[in-house]
Image (cartoon, helix red, strand yellow):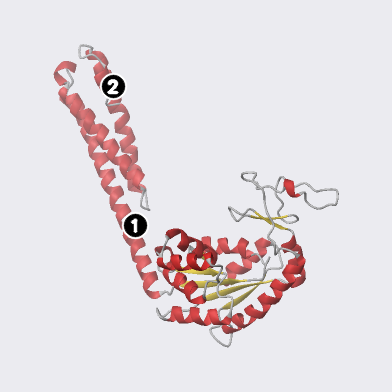
Amino acid sequence: LLAAPYLVPPQNTSAMRAALHHVRAVARPATAAFGTGIASRTTAPSNAHAIAGLAAAGVAVGAAAYQNEQQKQAECSVTELLPLIATAGMGVAAYMAANAKIEAEQAKIAELEAKFQKYWPRKIMMIFGPPGAGKGTQGPKIEALCGIPQLSTGDMIRAAIGAGTPVGLKVKDLVSKGALVSDEIVLEMIADRIQDDDCKNGFILDGFPRTMEQARKLDELLSKTGERVTRVMALDVPDSILEERICGRWIHKKSGTSYHVKFAPPKSMKLGADGKPDPATMLHDEDGSPLMQRSDDTASALKNRLAGYHKETTPILSHYGPKHTNVVAMVNANQAAAKVWEEIESKL
């Protein structure tokens, strides 16, 4: 709009007056409407609203300045400047009102966050469940609801190696030698990771601890800052149900997306003459890349995995159970995923 008068030859007085009139006609009601909207708002507008107010003011001031410059050529009356000046004033007022509300709302949010961090402890959670219990399905939902990250020891190891941190270099050396990563190194990685800003309100441990010794060392680590595990979510599914879940599972390795031949098949899946899925048709829905089955997602391997899980996990659940900190919540995971989530949400 401001450019329009400059595109008109100075000699064309009537065209210039028309252009200026157009600027005034558009800027004045638009800014007035904006100012009225700001005055009636009960919550702080976004930065976009504030910028819009300033922009409207800029248009009005620019138009007023240009019209004043061209008064002699266009023979404009001084009174024609008054609506533009009023429009500029409204734009500035709207901008200031928007900024004041934004700053007040931000101050209130900062105050609440500070109070939360001072008086409420971090939410330190664990998710337990046998293979196929649904940890991969329910974990991200807890993460999204609580706004705290889910920390996998495997992911932490890969991140530490990739970042070249001191502990990452230790792990890289061990992995290159085919040695196991010790509990002490894993705890060192956890200690570093939970200092990150995204963990200030809490975190979810996935895949750790796996043994009573690890649980005790974790408790010791947390006690250094006066903290402890605040919730253990244990997903319970009968072993007889798990074989069908596990043996029908296919995974997209890059994204970690899980599929199931019965419960969540990929769109491309086709059955062979034997009634089983044709591996060549098991493709990721998003990019069509091949899916894979874990080598231990078999009936024989599952039997050993379940035996190990029960042997190691039962003492850990007891450790955090009624006789001790009493933070374990048992969840019936042998039901529809939506029902499982309802139960989890009620026990968070």
Disc 1: which residue: 105
Q: Is residue 152 visible in the rendered structure shown here?
A: no
Q: Which residue is mark 2?
A: 4
Compared with 233, 48 (above or below) is above
Q: Amino acid at mark 1?
A: Glu
Whole-percent x and y of residue 330? 63, 75
Q: Tell me the SS state at disc 2.
A: helix
Location of residue 160 in the rendering, given as x and y in whole percent from the top left corner: 46, 63
Q: Residue furthest bottom?
A: 323
* In this picture, residue 293 sits left or right of residue 92: right
Residue 107 versus residue 194: which sits nearer the camera? 194
Please report the residue visible at 37 percent of the width from the left and 66 percent of the height from the top.
Answer: 112
Q: Tag 2: residue type?
A: Ala
Q: Eyeballing the image, is 265 above or below 305?
A: above
**Which residue lies most toward the left here?**
72
Mark 1 and mark 2 in contact (Cβ < 8 Å)?
no
Q: Residues within 10 Å of mark 2 (few under 14, many from 20)?
A: some
Q: Estimate the x, y position of residue 159 in percent, counting from the top left.
A: 47, 61
